[in-house]
Amino acid sequence: MSNQPVLSLENVEVHFENQRGFLGFGEEDETVRAVDGVTIDIEERDVVSLIGESGCGKTTLGKTCIGLQRPTGGSVKYRGEDMWDVRDGKSDSGLDWDEIRQSLQIIHQDPGASLNPNRRLVSILSEPLRQVSPDLSKGEKRERIYQLLEHVGMNPAADFAERYPHQLSGGEQQRVALCRALLMNPDVILADEAISALDVSLRVEMMDLMLDLQEEFDTSYVFISHDLSNARYFTEHGDGKIGVMYLGELVETGPAEQLINDPKHPYTKVLRWATPDLSLQEAGDMPMRKIDIPDPINPPSGCRFHTRCPEAREVCKRETPDTYQINGQQAACFRRDESHEYWDSPELMD
Amino acid sequence: MAAEGTQQQSALDVDDPVIRMRNADVTFDGGESYVLDDVSVDIDRNEIVGIVGESGSGKSMLASAMLDAIPDPGVLTGKIEYLAEDGREIDVLELSKEELRQMRWEDVSMVFQGAMSSFNPTMSIKGHFVETLKAHDYEVEPGIERAHELLEDLYLEPERVLNSYPHELSGGMQQRALIALSLVLEPEVLVMDEPTAALDLLMQRSILMLLRDLQDKYDLTMVFITHDLPLVAALADRLSVMYAFKLVEIGPTEEIVGHAAHPYTRALLNSTPNLDAPLEDMRPIEGQSPAPINLPSGCAYHPRCPLADDQCRSAVPDFEQTTQDHAAACYHWEDSIDQIPLNYEEMLDDDGGSQTDGDYV
Amino acid sequence: MKRTDSGSVSGTDFSFEKGSASNVEITWNDRLRDFWEEFIYKPGLVAWDDWRTRIGLTITLFFVFIGTAGAYFYPEPATNQAPRSLQPFENMNHMLGTTPLGEDVLSKIIHATPDILMMITSGAVWATGLAVLIGVLAGYKGGTTDRILTGLSDVAMSIPGLPLIMVLLVSIEPSNPLVIGAIITINYWAGLGRGLRSQVLTLRDEPYVEASRTMGVGTLRIMFKDIIPNLMPFVLVNFVHAARYVIFQAVGLYFIGILPSSTSNWGILLNQAVNQYGALFSLSGAYLVFIPTLAILLLTLGLILLAQGTDRIFNPRVRTRLAGESESTEDGDTEPVVTGGI
C-alpha cells in the first residue's frame, strides 16, 4: 500500500461557457465557474464528503475527480499521473486509460434512473464483470453476482437476479447500483447524493452497507451530500474528512467531528445552524446577511462569502483568503490569521 | 373502526379548533383498501402542527383531505369541519363546488411540494397574483399591495419578483413566491406539503424561520407535512406521526421529541442521523412499511415492533393518553419508553440543552 | 410504482468464495426456456391481452399464412382454368369468382401475397434499419459524426420521393420484390432517423447510460444494450408504418404501370380490372376492383392495429405483470428527490 494518494487534484478549474445573445451576436460570453481552483487529495480507503448548497460545484468537482468531467484548468492525477495526459496519449507512464476508467466508478442520486429498465439484474450486474474479469464463465459470473446480492440483503439471490429494476423498491435499486460499482473493483466510487432519494429510515442502512463493503473491496468514497448530518455519519464512521464548498471553492476541510463541533469558517457555522437537530433550542436568527446565493456567473469579489458572511469586513471584499491550516483542519478565512489586517478592518454593513 | 374515533375525540380536545376532522377515510378501490384510515384530529387555532410520516404513510392524503382535494377516483368519507374565526361552521364535504372553490385559498390555503409545477411558465408572478385576486373577486390594487408586503416579509424584492417569470427565479425564490401567493387572500389556515423538499439546507432553515414570522404577524394556523421530523420540530408546536395510513401519535413537540410513546416514533427518532446523537447508536428500522392492500391484522406496526404481543396482532389499538395533551395508539406505550432508549437522551437530560458548541445553535 | 423494501443487510464480512461454479450451471435447457419465454411467450401474452393487437396480429398472421401455406397448396392462376367471368359465390369451387380470362380470383390474390410480403418486409427492414443505424450513431456520438449524418439525412429528406422512385424503377426495371421494396423506401428512413436521433439525445444523458460509460463499456455495446432496447417501441411502430407505406406505394405504382407486371401484385389486378376489363363501368365487373381493394385494406388495417399494440410488448412492466411475476401495489407518496448542485 503506497502512501501516494489515489487521486490528487491541484488547482482544478471547471468553467462552462454559456453563450447568450440574439442569433449568436452575443453581448458577452457568460462563463459559469463551477469549480474555481480546488486542491484536494483522496487517499486509499478514504472517505471524502463534499457538502454545500446547490450551485456550489460539488457535483462537478465529484465528476472531475472520477474523470467524467474534463477540467478546464489545473490537473487531476491518478496515482501520480495526470489522467488526461494518459487519455490523450501524451503520457509515457505505462498506465492505460481503460484501467483508469475502470477504477473510478459512480452511484447516482436517482435509483430508478440508474438502472436500465429493460435489463434484468443479472444482466446489469454481468456488465461490470465482463469489463474487469472477462475470462469468467457465465456460471462463475452468476455465482459472484448471487453472492454479492445475498450479502447486501437481497435473498434469495437467484430470485432477485431475474427481476427487472421496476420490481424493486428504491432502497433495493440503490443497493444494486452499489453492487454494480463494487463489481468493477474500483479505487474510488463517487456517491452523488446517493442516499438523498431514499426514505429517511433507510439512509443509515445504506451508509452502513457502503462502509461495510469498503473494507472488502478496498475502495475510497467521494460522498456528495447537501445534508450535514448524513455527511457527518458517513465520514466519521469512515474515518475521513469533510470538504465544505461554496461557489466553486473549497472553504474548509477537516475530520467530521472536529469540523462540526469546532468549525473554523463562518460558512460552516452557518451550515451547522441550518441543519435541523432535536435539541429544540432556539436556533436564533438567520446568521447570514442575505438568504439567496449570489449568481455563480458573477461571483462576489475577494472572499466569495463576504456578501452573506456575518463576520465580513472591508478587506474581505478586496482580498481572497489563502487556506490556513489549524491542527488537521484547513479553512480559507482571514480570521484564522491573528496578524492579518482583517482585525483592523471595519465591519461590512448593509 | 368507529371506536377508535371516539377515544381520540376525548383524548385530544383542543381549546379552539379551526379544523375538526373525524373518522376521515380515503379509499381508491371501493373500500377494499384505505390510503387514509379513520383519522380523527383537531387543529387548534393559531398553532403550527407538524404531520410526520415516511413515504407511503398517507400524510399527503391527510393534507388533501382537509381541502377535500383527493384526486379521482379516490373517495373521501368522514366529517371534516372548518370553523372560521367569525363563527361560521362549515362542513367541508357538504360544500358545493363553488363554495368549495371559495373556501380554498380564501379560508384554507395550500402549498404543494415542488413550486415549479404550481406556476404557469408563461405568466409573470404578478400575473399569477392578479389572476388569483380576480378569480375570487377581490380588489386588485389593495391585493397587490398586500402582495408587496408579503414578498418583503419573505425577504424577496417585490418589484423584481413580481415582474419576473417563474423560470427566472431560483428554486428557493419560487417557493417563497408561492407562499406569498397562498397568503394573498388572507386565509386563516395554511396547509403545506413538503414545501422545502427540493431546497437546500440553508434555504430550508431560512424558510422555516420566515414561516414562523409569518404565523406570528398574520395570526395563521399552519399544518406542515413532511418526512423530516427534525426539520419540523424546530417550527411546530405540536407533532403528529402517521404510520400505515393511520395517526399513531400526537402531542406537543417537546413531549414527542423527549418522551415519544409509540415504538414507531421512537424508532424513527433513532434512525434519522442527527448531529447530536452519538454515532454508534443510530439504528435503521427493521422491516418495511406495509402496502394498503396488505395491511397486517391488528396494529399495523406489529411485524416490526419489539414489544408486539398477541393483543397487538389481533386488535387495532385505541389511543391511550400518556399525559394531558399527548396520546399514542399503542397498548404498551409505557414499556416503550423503557425498552426503546432514544440515542440522544443524554443531550435531553440537561433540560433540553445541547452538548454541542458552535456560535449559532 | 415502488414496492416496499424487503431484506436488511447481513453484518458479516464478505468475500467472493471460489466455490464450485457448478452450483449455478446454466444448462442448454435453461437457455432455450429463457429464449422461449423472453421472445415468444411473454410478448405473445402481451400482444394477446390488447384487443387491437389481437385483431391486428390475427389478420397479419392470416396473410402470412396464405402467403406461405396458401400459396403452396392452392393451385396457381392460369387462363381458362375455370368458366369465365364468374361472380363471387356463384361457384363454390371458385369462391371469389373468375376474371374474363377464366383465372380464379382467389388464386390470384393468394399468389400475389408472397411477393407482397417480401416487398413490404424488405422495405420496412431497409428503412427502419438504416434509420436506427444513422439516427442512433448521430445522436450518441454527436460532434462531426452527427453533423455529417444529419446533413445526409437532410439531403435525403429534401429529394422528392415519388419522382426519384419512379426514375429508379424505370431505369433499373427490377423484378425481385425485395429490391422493389428497398427502392420504394429509398428516402423514407430520413425522417425516422431524425426522430430517433432526438430520442437518443435524451437517453444519452440518463444516469444508467452514464454508468455504462463510466464502466468503460464500448460505444457500440452501449448503443445496442442500453439505447436501442429503450427505443424499440418507437422503432417497431415505425417499422409497421413503413410496411404500410410500401403497400400503398407499390399498389399505386403497379396501378399506373411503372412497376412491371411480371411480378404478381394486387395492384396489377386493379390495373387489369380498370383498364382491361372495364370493371369501373359495369356493376357486374365491380367485384374485380372490389376484391383486390379489400385485400389491400385488410392487410393495412391489420398492420396498423398491430403497430398500435406493439409498443406494449417492450414495456417490461406490462410484460411481467401479465406473466404474473409482480403484484402491483397502490402508489404511495414518493420521497422527494433533492435537486443537487452543478
Image: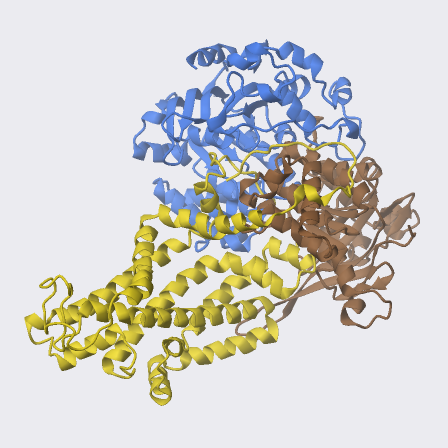
Chain colours: A brown, B blue, C yellow
Q: Looking at the picture, how far across and down is residue C116, in whole percent?
A: 32, 71
Measuring from the top left, give residue C90's x and y in whole percent: 9, 63
Quadrant containing the N terminus of chain B in the rendered view: top left
Judge whether residue A59 can be spotted in this image. Answer: no
Question: Toward the viewer: B187 or C272?
Answer: C272
Relative to C203, is B118 above or below? above
**Camera-nearest residue between C232 and A303:** C232
Quadrant hosting residue B353: top right
> Is residue A93 shown above or below A47?
below
State the residue at coordinates (72%, 53%): A136
Residue projecting furthest to the bottom = C171
Identity of the residue drawn at 21% across and 65% down:
C294
Q: Which part of the image, by quadrant, shows the C terminus of chain B?
A: top right
Q: Is residue C188 above or below residue B342?
A: below
Decide if residue C112 is on the left or right side of residue C43: left
Number of numbered discs on residues: 0
**In this rendering, position of residue B201 left or right of residue B157:** right
Could you tell me if residue C142 is visible in this image?
yes
Give the x, y percent position of residue A54: 66, 49
* Left or right of C297, for residue C97: left
Q: Quadrant of residue C163?
A: bottom left
Position of residue C334 measured from the top left corner of the image (x, y, whole percent) = 53, 38
Examine the image and state in which quarter residue C8 appears.
top right
